[in-house]
């Protein structure tokens, strides 16, 4: 056999091997592309309703508001769907333990004119239902999202939650760090509603978690309680009032201390009374009027100590139990003040 013929056969074999290798690489690439496209869609978005809801809730859980918004149908308002609001929700209660699954095909068909296949979850011009469960803080919740076609991808149609806020006089009420003045309906991501007040003496009470999806509208009537600073300020206002009234030297303290109500029910020499302010305030009840949140009602009784010169009988000491009914104005400046009723 000639040397030239041997070389020719070797070259032919090499080309065949190279061609086969290229064919294998091409098939592998095609399979990878098809798998990726099936799950992710041509735009890189999740390719199935279940994957879309999972990605949406994952973005919400990561406080990735831009990512969550890209997977949603446009909401009526994005005022409380920004980065800061998402971060506040995440700080208030993290979303964890996310699980999603598509409903049975016959259930999904109730909201679609097309037939969805159970294995792929795809349907043209369809709206499919995806059940989701997750935890908001320590609370387990469940809801169902509606997922719709948008060209080559799927979008969560009802990912946001609608919250209706009752009229309130809470000063500087905020939700997720944004003022709610004049707002009656707002839209938020699934998670915890984090409220605040512009008055540092008040905190908004109650805990509200929202899921979006097929959950009903959340209606909230915010209520308030005293913060630690509010309790301290209210106690200081009451104590300031009592200390001022202790400066009276008359049997009827209102004589020389207008607004003071303690009274000695015995005859005493004019200007001979020395009052000692009550030490314990444990019998006083504090209550916030939710209709006027900056007014803290104070009622109960206190015990005064009075040393005086009796008109008949010389020096005397008495304990005087005195009703106390009034309120502390938390909006007063520079500090809250107590005023008696009447």
Image: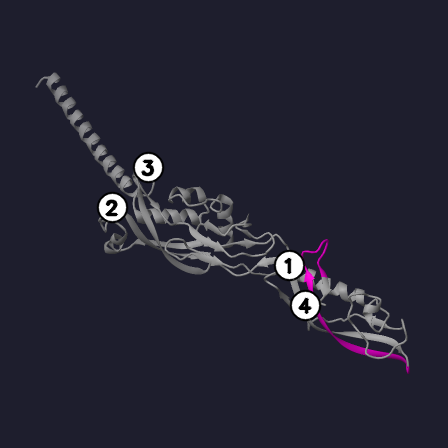
| Mark 2 to mark 1 CA distance (whole Å) | 56 Å
Point out the stretch of residues depicted in magenta: 312-337
| Mark 1 to mark 3 CA distance (whole Å) | 54 Å
Q: Is residue 229 visible?
A: yes
**Image position, residue 15 (x, y; %):** 17, 25
Cβ atoms under marks 1 and 3 closer than 8 Å? no
Disc 4, SS: strand
Residue displayed at 84% across by 74% down: 251
| Mark 4 to mark 1 CA distance (whole Å) | 13 Å
**Image position, residue 168 (x, y; %):** 56, 57
Residue beneath label 3, please?
43
Instruction: Pick whichever of labels 4 and 3 is earlier in the sequence.
Output: 3
Answer with left or right where residue 269 lies relative to residue 180.
right
Instruction: Pick whichever of labels 1 and 3 is earlier in the sequence.
Output: 3
Q: Nearer the viewer, mark 2 or mark 4?
A: 4
Quadrant of the drawing holding the N terminus: top left
Asked whether 316 falls inside the magenta stretch, the response is yes
Instruction: Pick whichever of labels 3 and 2 is earlier in the sequence.
Output: 3
| Mark 3 to mark 2 CA distance (whole Å) | 18 Å
Residue beneath label 4, please?
298
Residue beneath label 2, please?
123
Residue displayed at 84% across by 68% down: 255
Which dot marks residue 294? 1
């Amino acid at each position: 056999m000639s040397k030239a013929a041997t070389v020719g056969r070797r070259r032919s074999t090499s080309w065949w091997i190279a061609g086969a290798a290229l064919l294998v690489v091409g098939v592998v690439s095609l399979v990878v592309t098809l798998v990726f496209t099936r799950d992710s869609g041509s735009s890189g978005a999740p390719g199935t309703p279940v994957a879309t809801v999972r990605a949406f809730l994952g973005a919400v859980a990561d406080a990735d508001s831009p990512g969550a918004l890209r997977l949603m149908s446009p909401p009526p308002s994005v005022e409380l769907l920004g980065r800061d609001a998402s971060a506040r929700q995440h700080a208030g209660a993290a979303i964890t333990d996310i699980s999603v699954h598509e409903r049975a095909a016959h259930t999904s068909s109730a909201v679609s004119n097309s037939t969805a296949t159970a294995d792929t979850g795809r349907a043209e011009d369809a709206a499919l239902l995806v059940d989701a469960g997750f935890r908001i803080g320590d609370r387990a919740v469940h809801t169902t999202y509606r997922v719709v076609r948008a060209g080559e991808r799927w979008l969560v149609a009802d990912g946001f939650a609608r919250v209706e806020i009752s009229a309130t006089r809470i000063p500087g009420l905020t939700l997720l760090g944004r003022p709610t003045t004049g707002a009656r309906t707002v839209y938020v991501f699934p998670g915890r509603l984090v409220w605040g007040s512009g008055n540092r003496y008040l905190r908004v009470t109650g805990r509200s978690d929202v899921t979006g999806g097929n959950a009903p509208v959340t209606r909230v009537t915010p209520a308030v309680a005293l913060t630690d600073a509010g309790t301290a300020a209210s106690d200081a206002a009451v104590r300031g009032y009592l200390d001022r009234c202790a400066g009276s030297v008359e049997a009827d303290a209102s004589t020389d201390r207008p607004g003071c109500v303690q009274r000695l029910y015995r005859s005493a020499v004019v200007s001979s009374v020395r009052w000692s302010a009550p030490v314990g305030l444990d019998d006083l009840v504090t209550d916030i009027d939710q209709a006027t949140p900056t007014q803290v009602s104070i009622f109960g009784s206190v015990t005064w100590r009075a040393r005086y010169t009796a008109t008949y009988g010389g020096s005397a000491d008495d304990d005087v139990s005195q009703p106390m009914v009034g309120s502390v104005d938390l909006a007063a400046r520079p500090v809250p003040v107590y005023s008696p009723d009447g």
